[in-house]
Image (cartoon, grey):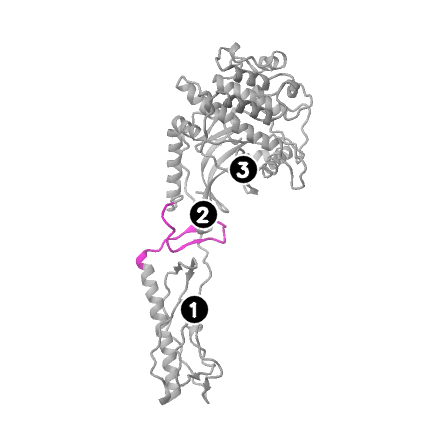
Amino acid sequence: MSQLGTYEFLFELASGGMGTVELAVARGAFGVERLVAIKRIRPHLTETNEVVSRFLDEARIISQLHHANVVGVHHASEDQRGYFLVFDYVEGETLSGLIDLANIRDERMPLPIVIRVILDGLNGLNAAHEAKNANGEPLHILHRDVSRQNLIVGTDGVTRLSDFGISKSTMHSTVTSQSYLAGKLIYMAPEYLSRAAVDRRMDIYAMGVTLWTAIAGREPWPEEGEAHTMTRIMTEGVPTLSASGVSVAPEIEAIVARACQPRPADRYATARQMIDALEEFGRHGGSIASQMEVAEYVESMAGEYLEDRRKMIAERLATRGTPFLSTEPPPPGTHASQETGAASTTYAGATDNVTARWRYVAAGAAIVALVAGIAVVARGPRASGTPVLAPSSFGPAVAPTADTATPVPAATPIPAATPVPAATPEIDRAAGEPIAAPSASQVAPSASQEVKSLPEEPRPPVLAAPRAKRASPAGSTPASAPAIPTQISTANPYR
């Protein structure tokens, strides 16, 4: 696996004309890790200032949004491969993928599932429309690319709005040309196609078309080319569901028809108004699925594909010997690299840890005994018969006070302590840090120091083993990427 700071790349999730999305694992200290999606623009596009500006504008906009129904961004940076954004990884399938899977089974998505997915998408859209900066000033965010491809339905039953790559707001540094159109034609509002002024109602229109396609299982004009489709949008508007041969409750048909009105003034003015209309349908006998029911539907439709992806993730992580999110507590020897910023793990066997513990005890006892023996020889016949205690890891060191110690006229040199073999560090489970064996210089005084005699009833010194600083292991070794699994939907949910 290749390494980028705290991120270890696993494999590519999707690709498009503008960039790619890769799955990676973000590793931190103490075994903290999570999967993330890393979005990149293609290297040759980094030479275009407008493309780079839009890419970075996306990060600035999403960083202002903190909502359960919006895919969050964690980080934006640049490396030798170009610019990249780090997003939440949402395990699930796009609404477009679920529609395709249902069509393969010659089915349509259940209406209660569709309504819950659209409600979640509208909540995320409303959060973007109503967002404010730290000073409380409106950001006036327009998504401009609401579509079934950009609604990700998670295995947790929550739908999230993604891809703000062509969005507009007061934070944008890019000025869009009047001749420039961005987005997917079928979801473009008539006023946008005619280059008229646009506002949040263009996103309402796109969500209405998304609801239309999710209910019908297809687009309004599936056989038309782009030129004819544009003409129909401008002159005829989106047909009603019943006129297209789709049977649905009258209340739902009315909601879809209002959201898809050609004139902005005839649509819902806000996402909140459309949310209220759908929830009103639910309160008066209509069925709206719970998030748990949506989760079960995603698993039933895309579970096999998602399981294949989970296996690929496990295999890639196994190549470096570290299982992802292991249920076992991290064994001694786990520590974080401070050179690369990534957490890497080295495991020491239980036998080695026990051996290391007794090495420390034996070494400490020998050193203390040596010091006490020299003190007895220096004092002569007045030495006390009190036994010497082994070193303890609890409490501060205890030593005679200055007013009770009687200095010896001449300083006695102390021989150097016998070196102790190095041992594997052991974790102090109370403090969560490695414990290093005390060195001779830390325990025994130097030859130039004076040795003081103990009082008549001395208390033997109790020495605490000093704690060592955290170690910094080497980074992980990259491995080759496995084959990418075949997806039913080739659309890039993050593009």
Q: Mark 1 is on which residue type?
A: Gly
Say which label, 3 or 1, has the lower sequence index: 3
Instruction: Residue 32: give its label.
Output: 2
What is the count of numbered marks? 3
Seen in the image, is 78 located left or right of residue 394? right
Q: Secondary structure at mark 2?
A: loop
- The residue where tag 3 is placed is 72
Foreground residue among 163 and 77: 163
Asked if residue 367 is among those painted magenta in the image, a careful observer would answer no
| Vertical position of residue 181 compared to residue 307: above or below | above
How far apart are labels 3 and 1 at the CA level? 47 Å
How far apart are labels 1 and 2 at the CA level? 31 Å
Residue 238: where, in percent of width, then height? 57, 14
Q: For label 2, count other residues whose C-alpha is less than 10 Å away and answer few (under 14), some (14-19) or many (20+).
A: few
Q: Secondary structure at mark 1?
A: loop
The magenta segment? 326-351
Say which label, 1 or 2, has the lower sequence index: 2
Name the quarter where the N terminus is drawn: top left
Seen in the image, is 53 located left or right of residue 23? right
Q: Mark 2 is on which residue type?
A: Val
Mark 3 or mark 1: which is in front?
1
Q: Mark 3 is on which residue type?
A: Gly
- The residue where tag 1 is placed is 395
How far apart are labels 2 and 3 at the CA level? 19 Å
Q: Are dots 1 and 2 in contact, CB under 8 Å?
A: no
Seen in the image, is 308 located left or right of residue 409? left
Q: Which is the main secondary structure of the residues drawn in magenta?
A: loop
Foreground residue among 319 and 156: 156
Q: For label 3, count other residues whose C-alpha is less than 10 Å away and answer few (under 14), some (14-19) or many (20+).
A: many
